[in-house]
Amino acid sequence: MPFVTEELWQRLPHEGETIMYAAWPLPDETIEDRGLMEEMAHLLDVVREVRNLRQGSEQKARRLPAEVTSARRLLTEPVGRAYLATLAGLELNGKLPQDMPQSVVVVGNTTVRLGLPGDGGAEKQRHQGELQRKLREIESIEAKLNNPDFTGKAPAAVVERERVRLTQARQAAERLQTLLDS
């Protein structure tokens, strides 16, 4: 392939003798869509959590029935839901049966309810563990934001990002507590 690449490069307008010594092109940051990049990062976090749940619960079903609720723009659109269904191995065709045991994955402001076979006892333990992790995360972020050295020396964007993370972690903890209470 390097010979083909060199041949193509020589036939295009260029500077320099060979592509081997040419500078790597720089990305054009003006065409980046930061909002969409954040949406995709969130979608991938949701996929990762669903996959982790499936691996931990040893589900053999190819596609699990699921419901998704989210305030995220991408996950409310059909294309985003299709990505989630494909990447996480979910069947997003309406409501889950009430008699089916369910497991819930909470990532930020997105909740995915999965229909799982079994009694649900393991899911309650998993939710309790996840709630404990969220509470530790909240404690850590609060300690960081209450530290005057951090808030005084860190760039404003970093401090704001930590405040957003704190809000999202609190919302996730509230949803998990509601699930455990119900």
Image (spheres, helix red, strand yellow):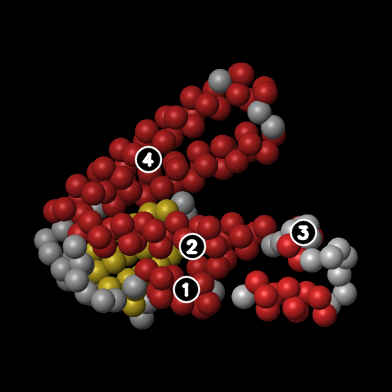
Residue contact at pointers 4 and 2, CB within 8 angstroms: no
**Is 96 displayed left or right of 150 in the figure?**
left
Where is residue 101? Give x, y as percent: 18, 65
Amino acid type of the residue that numbered disc 1 sits on in the rendered structure: Tyr
Residue 110 in sight: no
Nearest the viewer among 110 and 150 is 150
Distance CA(mark 3)–CA(mark 2):
39 Å
Please report the residue visible at 29 percent of the width from the left and 76 percent of the height from the top.
Answer: 63
Q: Answer with mark 3 or mark 4, whichever residue precedes in sequence.
A: 3
Residue linked to disc 3: 21
Distance CA(mark 4)–CA(mark 2):
19 Å
Q: Quadrant of residue 7?
A: bottom right
Q: Answer with mark 1 or mark 2, whichever residue precedes in sequence.
A: 2
Q: Answer with mark 1 or mark 3, whichever residue precedes in sequence.
A: 3
Q: Nearer the viewer, mark 4 or mark 1?
A: 1
Q: Answer with mark 4 or mark 2, whichever residue precedes in sequence.
A: 2
Where is residue 111? Give x, y as percent: 39, 59
